[in-house]
Amino acid sequence: MSAIPPRSLVVVSAGLSQPSTTRLLADRLSVAVDQHLRDAGIEPHLEVIELRDHAQDLTNHLLTGFPSPRLKAAIDAVLAADGLIAVTPIFSASYSGLFKLFFDLVERDGLAGKPVLIAATGGTVRHSLALEHALRPLFAYLNAAVVATGVYAATEDWGGGGAADGGLVQRIDRAARELSASMAARESSAPTDPFADPVPFDQLFRPS
Amino acid sequence: MQFGIFSIGDVTTDPTTGRAPSEAERIQAMVTIALKAEEVGLDVFATGEHHNPPFVPSSPTTMLGFIAARTERLILSTATTLITTNDPVKIAEDYAMLQHLAGGRVDLMLGRGNTGPVYPWFGQDIRNGIPLAYENYALLHRLWREDVVDWEGKYRTPLTGFTSTPRPLDGVPPFVWHGSIRSPEIAEQAAHYGDGFFHNNIFWPKEHVQRMVELYRRRFEYYGHGPADQAIVGLGGQVFMRTNSQDAVREFRPYFDHAPVYGGGPSLEEYMAQTPLTVGSPQQVIDRTLSFREIVGDYQRQLFLLDHAGLPLETVLEQLDVLGELVVPVLRREFAANRPANVPEAPLHPRVQAAQAARAAKTVAG
C-alpha cells in the first residue's frame, strides 16, 4: 500500500458518436496519465464522464437552475477531482455546445487551481489552434491550472505513425507527463463545503 | 403551525386560452385570492415585490393595507421584501404603519431579488447583493428597536438623530423571516439575529433544502437563541389538486409545459420527482406536505403557491376551497399530533396572540 494518497482523475468527453474519436483520444490520454501517476507511486482513481449521457439533464439544469441527481454526481466528481482531462470535438472553430454547456454549469470557482489537460479532435489539422484560442481561454477564465501541452488529434493523426517526433503518441505522452506531475505536486484536497464550515457572521459583516 | 399562500403576482398568458389578464384584473385577483384565503381558514397571505413586468405587486404595503381593512384574522406578509434595493428607512416606516393599521397582523420575509437591471433602477448593484442585505438589515433592525438612531454605512446617506415613525405597534417590531434559496450566508444571517428562515423550496431538490435548513438550525443554536429544533423555519410548496389525480395531471400539464419557469425543461413527472411540486389528489398533497417534516424537522410555516403559470382565477379559488376544506385541516391535525412540546409556534404580535386566544376560548365556550 502506497503512503502517497490516491488521486482522482476525471475525464470529461464531449464526443457524440459511440465509439467516438473524442472518446478514443480521451482514453489514450487517461491511460497515459494513469501510467505516469503509477510510475510516481500514486494510485489513480479514474472516472469518465460522457457528456452525451447528460445532454437532456444539462439543458434541464440550464432552464430550472438545479441538476438532476445523476448530473449532480457528475458535477461533484469534477469539483472533487485532483486532475481533469477535458476533451471536445471542434465544431465551427471552437468547442462543441455540449462541452461549453457542461462547464457553464460547473460553479464559477469550482475549477480554481485544478490541473487540467485540454484536448480536442477534428477533421482537419487546420483547426488545431482552437485549443489555444477557445479551450485555453475558457479554462484560464475558470482559474484552472491548464498544463502547457494541449493535444489536438485530426483524422490524419490516427494513421500517422504517432511515435515519431511531434507525432500524436508523443504529444499524448508529453501532455500526460505534465498533468501527472502537476497532480502529484498538488495536495489532494476536497472542495470546501460552505454548509459544513460556514463563515461566521462577524466575518461577513461588521457594522461601521 | 401556520398555513398560507404566497403569490408572485405575475401576469401570465393562460396557455389553454391564449388570454392574459390585464394588470387591473391581476391586482384584483390577488386581493380576491387573499380574502378567500381567510374565508377558507388559512393563516397567512404573502405577496411578492417586483419592479418589472410581467409582475404587478410593486407596492406591497398598499395592497396589504387594503387587504388588512377587509380581513379579521389573516396574517399579512411578503415573499419577499427587497432588502437590497429598498431604503431600509422606508421599509421600517411602511411596515410599522401597516402593523398599526392591521392590528399587528404583519410580518415580512426579506429577500435580495435576482433581476440584475432592477438594482441600478434603485441606485444599487446586484454584485453587492449580500453586503446590501447585511447592511440594510442591520439598520432596519435598529430602526425598529431604538427610538433615536445615529448611523453611518456604505450604501445610504448617514442618519443623525433619526426617529423612524410610527414606532412599531406596542413597541414590538414585525417578525422577520430571511428568505434564500441558495446562499448559506443568508441562513447564517437569520441564525445570527435569531430571526426566522424561509426556504422557498419550490424549485429545489430536497437534499439542498435539507442542507440550508440544517445550517440555519445549527447556527441558530450556536448564536444562543435556543436549541436547533426551536429555530423558526418556513417552507414553500406548489400544488394543483383535483379529486382524481389523473384529472389534476391532465388539467395542469399545459400550464406546466408553457410556464415561464418550467417550459422546455424536464417533464412534469421528472419535476414532481425532483421538487415539492405536487399535482394530484388532495391526499397526495397531504402526504407530500407531511413528508417535508422528515426533511427539515418540525417547522412553523407552510406557504403554498397556487396562482401561477396563467391559471385562471376561478381555478385558483377552487384550489383554495380544496386546500381549506380537505387539506389544511388534516395537515393541522397530523403536524400537531407528532409535534414535540418544546417546538414553538412562529412568533406573533401580542395583540394577534390575544385575539387568537379569545377566539379559541369562545369556540370552547360556545
Image: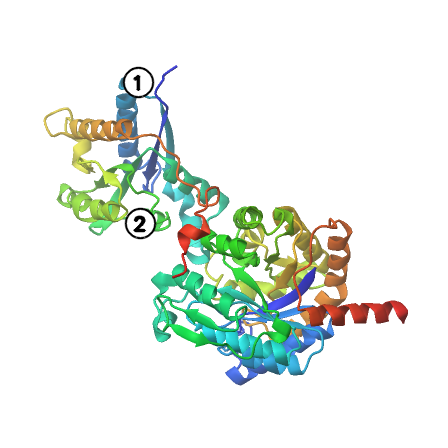
| Residue B60 shows in the view | no
The residue sitting at 36% across, 16% down in the picture is: A2
Give left or right: position of B35 versus B24: right
- For numbered disc 1, what is the local secondary structure? loop
The residue sitting at 9% across, 26% down in the picture is: A165
**Quarter occupied by residue A135:** top left
Where is residue B313 drawn, in percent x and y? 62, 76
B254 relative to B295, above or below: below
Q: Which residue is mark 1?
A: A41
Where is residue B17 drawn, in percent x and y? 55, 76
Looking at the rendering, in which quadrant would you find the N terminus of chain B?
bottom right
User: Label 2 near label 1: C-beta < 8 Å?
Assistant: no
Q: Which residue is mark 2?
A: A100
Where is residue B115 drawn, in percent x and y? 40, 67
**Quarter occupied by residue A180:** top left
**Quarter occupied by residue A5:** top left
Looking at the rendering, in which quadrant would you find the C terminus of chain B?
bottom right
User: Mark on residue B253?
Assistant: none
Query: What chain does badge 2 belong to?
Result: A
Q: Nearer the viewer, residue B208 or A196?
A: A196
Furthest residue toward bottom = B24
The residue sitting at 45% across, 60% down in the picture is: B264
Which amino acid type corresponds to the residue marked 2 in the rendered image? Lys
Q: CA distance from mark 1 to mark 2?
A: 34 Å
Which of the two discs, 1 and 2, sits closer to the camera? 1
